[in-house]
Amino acid sequence: MKIGAPAWYGHRPFGKKLREILEMGFDYSEIALDYPLPEKAEELERAIKDLDLKPAFHAPLDMLVACPRDEIFRASMKILKKCLEFAAKFETLYFNFHAMHFTPTYIFSEIKAQGIRNLEQAIKFAVEFGREAGFDICLENDQFFMEDFVLGDVKLTLDLGHFVIDSYRLGEDYRKALKDFVKKYEDRIAVLHVHDVNFSSFSDHLALGSGDLDYEVLKWLFESLGLRFVLLEVFWKDVKYSMNFADRDDLQKSLNFLKSIVLR
């Protein structure tokens, strides 16, 4: 099992950040390819090669491959292709993406069906590309996620914080819902994203050990799944989108806390 930490455009210079991640004891980094990446990625490419890093990549969040509007979908496919070609330059571990759209009419079956047809096309293309390049394509659960999106041979990234907050928002027992989800999709789950949550503010991506997550659930996940990759996806010190970003100490404490849970 490899444990990783995230990196994005805001962490430049990339060489310094990626070196720091490795020095802290992480095995890899999942690097977000939000604009202006991957077009302007000379510094990032150089850093990955200089450090002999085996990276993972997170697709841009403005890549809307589940959108039913063909013009937006076609543009998103161009972005997807560009990102996959960039990932193929390295010994990439996996490529993570969200099946997103911003379509209010998705509640109507005929609109949803068009979005799913587009997504199926995107997944087929990405999975075939990844198979040739030697890395898995992983669909991450989020507020847009529905089980209809689990298509073809796509793998899954189970984002624990997203799952917990979304279940809590719906008034569900997230422990039961999570066990049902894992039982159904355990053969597809290739990556686990881990971070803490705060129920009162509906915040996720908090430092592990600082919030309301039931850590016995986290321990159960490690015991139940033969995980290859775990990403400590810690972004915030306190409230989500507060611009109070987590720092190195928060990430190190999260890593130590994770190891105390799963290695005890």
Image (cartoon, rainbow, N blue to C red):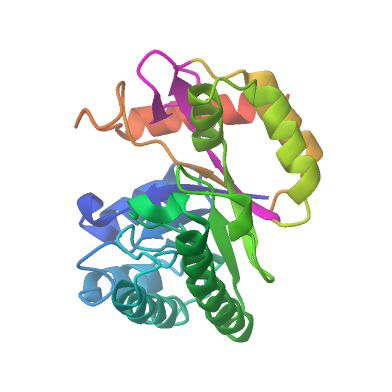
Residue closest to the eye, 116 or 179? 116
Drawn side of residue 98 relative to residue 164, left or right: left
* Residue 197 among those drawn in magenta: yes
Q: Quadrant of residue 155?
A: bottom right
For the C terminus, the image quarter is: top right
Percent coordinates x, y for residue 243 in the rendering = 19, 32
**Does residue 229 show up?**
no
Residue at (61% x, 22% y) in the render: 172
Point 40% across, 49% down: residue? 6
Task: Pick the residue in front: 173 or 138.
Answer: 173
- Give the quarter of the image for residue 171: top right
Q: Is residue 238 left or right of residue 151?
A: left
Q: Residue at x 29, y 22 (%)?
A: 239
* Count of numbered marks: 0
Using the image as rendered, state which of residue 244 and residue 158 is in the foreground: 158
- In the image, residue 105 sits, relative to residue 84, either above or below, namely above
Residue 65 picture location, percent across and down: 42, 68
Q: Does the magenta segment cover residue 26?
A: no
**Is residue 236 in sight in this rendering?**
yes
Q: Which residues are magenta?
A: 189-211
Residue at point 50%, 63% (across, down): 110
- Residue 144 lies, in percent from the top left, at 46, 48
Taking the view exactly as shown, the residue that stands out farthest to the bottom is 132
Compared across the picture, whether 257 is left or right of 189 comes to left
Residue 58 coordinates in the image, percent (x, y): 42, 60
